[in-house]
Amino acid sequence: MNIANELANIVGKKYVLTKYEEIVPYVKDASYIEGEKPIAVVIPGNVFEVSKVLKLCYENDVPVYVRGGGTSLTGSSVPEGGIVMSMLRFDKILEVNIKDRYVIAEAGVRVGELNSYLEKYGYMYPPDPASDIAATIGGSINTNAGGVRGAKYGATKEWVLGLEVVLPDGTITQFGEKTLKRSEGYDLTALMIGSEGTLGVVTKATLKIAPLPEREAMFLAFYDSYKRFGDVISTLNERGLIPLTAEFLDEVSMNAVKSYGIPYPDNAKALLIIITSEMSDQVLKAIKETSPIELRTIKDKKEMDDTLKLRKGLYSSLLLERETPEQRVIIGDIVVPPSKISETIEEIYNAAKSIGLKIAVFGHIGDGNVHVNIFAGPNDFDKAKELLLETGMIAVKHEGCVSAEHGIGLEKKELLLKEFAYRNNQINLELMKKIKNVFDPKNILNRGKLIE
Amino acid sequence: MIQRIYSTGESSLNEVIRALSSEASNCINCGFCEAVCPTIPAFDYKTSMGARGRINLAKEFLSGNHSLNFRDPFESCLDCYACFQVCPAHVNSGVVSELMKQAIAEGQIENQKHQVAEMITKIVFKYKDPLGLKKELTEWSKGLEFENSYETILYTGHMHQLMAYNKKLSEMLKSIGELYRFLAPLLSSLGNPSFIFSKFYDKKIKERSESQLKNIYFLLKKAGVKFSYLGVEEPYPGTLMIDMGYVNEFKQYAQWVTDLFHKKGVKNIITVDPHTYDVLLNKYTKYVKGFDFNVTFYLDHLSTLKFSRLDKIVTYHEPCHLVRHTDHNVPKGFIESITNLILPIHNGKNTYCCGGPIEAFYPKASEKISDKRFKELKQTKAEIIITSCPICFVNLYKDESVMDISELLANLVT
């Protein structure tokens, strides 16, 4: 059987790619991991075509790697042979319902595009990964993406109401509904979130939306050590103050964004950016109690926007700090309870120093999410992997997790096992494998990822 | 791998490889460019026909793999630079395409030259115009008076005038399919192909384009600008040559144009379309010796004019070559001050290409892109859609609500 011909019978010849030059771009994603060339790339245009493609692959034991925006940072979307199913033709926003607070979008809609669309209604879909310009709804659901709004709004799992899913054997089903709550046994919708394309193919999502918040104030607090700034979120939590955004940058990160023209004290080691929508006076008071060496308040909306650009452009600025183009900035992603953030960062610095790699640390301090950015040249990859492992275990020791919002993919499979082992939770892996087997007994979806 | 190519290539190839390597190797494969690249949906959602895919393919070329089909992925690039606006690593996939087109045009990638591109380059060299037309291109200026001195010239760059012919040519290419491979070399070998091309033009577009040039003339006069026009001696700037990667030919040709300007005593050049403005500002200054003219866009000269207000909702399609290639925002300022302007969802630096640059070679994809942009412009509910580029105008001219900014200003000037 010629799989490409069979696929062409389903979706049409022009939507099946087999030439080398056509499939090259599908071998990599945004991670440093390169996959193996697929036999073909198929670009279905509707749920029935997805169903037929999966049925064909299921019956013939052909692995299927589903791809959205190809923005995974853990190698989650790279193929290892098989076929790639690109979801980019699923690019329509189907319904906005303000009365019932939901939007229905196809899986290939870019997260940023959805938010631009919702803006005219005064609404937003809160998960806003840094890659929102390219990340798709389907991909972000499959990695349980977060973002800078996570402090107040949480990650993707809080915002998915229902999903249209095609199971590996081609069965089309729907999990969840348009309702804001449900109590109906096992939450199959939730099971799909963060499943990294291993259980089914999301073709359409019903997403909860929220009114765009009014920003009241932005605070920039500078600290001369990593020890104090970590206390801010704990203090705010103790007083019931939840900011819209709470981000932090370390010294290397601050240096990288110097071009944005925000001066900082010479002895500053960390910058905290907090945006509030209410009770700003109390937030200000709480920040002051943590003894920043300098504290600035911004109330002008444009100035807030300009300052936020600094955070949005941070990764870009770090890339300019590379010593050679071959050097990569590998983005680590861990999470700890916010009260543990200072000691976690301290230990990460020590680990980087002993391994001998330059790092820049920033993250979403509001939910304890730390991104350790490792500068790694072509000869440093082994050391970088060692540091990623160590960083993950530092998080675990501090009651955290090895992945906050980037998923497991290929990069963190070993780390996930170590986390389970550390907590003596090996049974979790067995449960996950059993779940996988129920959905996908022939293991055709995203073979080799997550738990294998 | 790069070293290997360095040691075997010609000097110009070395230049291409070095530039390509420095641009492409900074790419981190994040995919941001892919999300904004208009050619992906236009080419059936194939990512090899988009910004990130092009960089992946350029890397294949750099690694020594010269046998792939590079022509379609790179010649389909709109050169709109949407990719560059969003790249966190400051990589310009548009520049990668330009360099790959250069490698194709220079024959470094075998058998991938485009016959029509070859034909146009040959004709430009011979007749100082892509279609060998001379008389036809000056018809707009019949009866108009110009200064005797060429110190300041209105330089049309032939862009407005060529639109009517270009439209017919692309229709012809669409209908003959692969036959162009045989016809193009034949046409370029003719003594003077103008007798063929001069017969094929879109009458309505011709009238409209000529009227736009007259509006520009009228507005400049009204603003008190003293200028001349080279008429049949006006050379084409060579834009298509550089767009298609014929850099060496362009350098030679552009030097000839520059020398001609000098010979005529030109000091100031007033351009009337974004592509000519861009090519003079960014390419002539880069590739040509002695290009020391003061280059402006005609709207820069109209600040003293008074306009009556149009109480209508209008939207403005910002041309890529103005807002992204040259950072020129004067047209928006005019429109904003005299109408009720509502911008489309993609605006400013994030504007969306009209599809025009690939209309001749990839008409179907070009149409998909222009349809998408037209829909966005219509979604603003504006009664009038304004452009400030003849290519954008022709591609978006899908109903009578579309007009050039020169038409709006000529109607409202007091």
Image (tube, coloured by chain):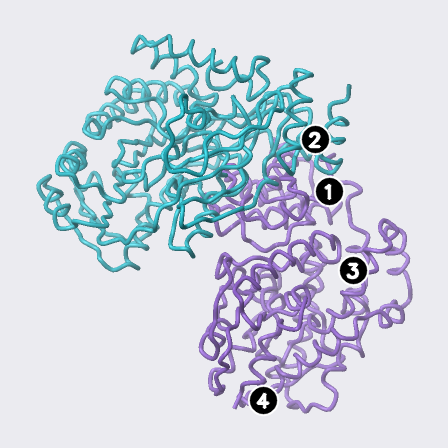
Amino acid under disc 2: Tyr
Residue A57 vs residue A408: left or right? Answer: right
On the image, numbered disc 2 is attached to which residue? A20
Please tell me the colour of chain B: purple
Give me the chain letter of mark 1.
Answer: B
- Comparing A183 with A399, the one in front is A183
On the image, numbered disc 4 is attached to which residue? B221
On the image, numbered disc 1 is attached to which residue? B108
On the image, numbered disc 3 is attached to which residue? B170
- Comparing B61 with A280, the one in front is A280
- Residue positioned 22% across, 29% down in the render: A341
Of the image marks 1 and 4, the number of the one nearer the N terminus? 1
Residue A130 vs residue B324: left or right? Answer: left
Q: Nearer the viewer, mark 1 or mark 4?
A: 4
- Residue B338 placed where, x, y %? 47, 80
Please tell me the colour of chain A: cyan
- Labels 2 and 1 touching (C-beta < 8 A): no
Q: Which quarter of the figure has residue A88?
A: top right
- Residue A345 placed where, x, y %? 24, 28
- Residue B170 placed where, x, y %? 78, 60
Q: Nearer the viewer, mark 2 or mark 1?
A: 2
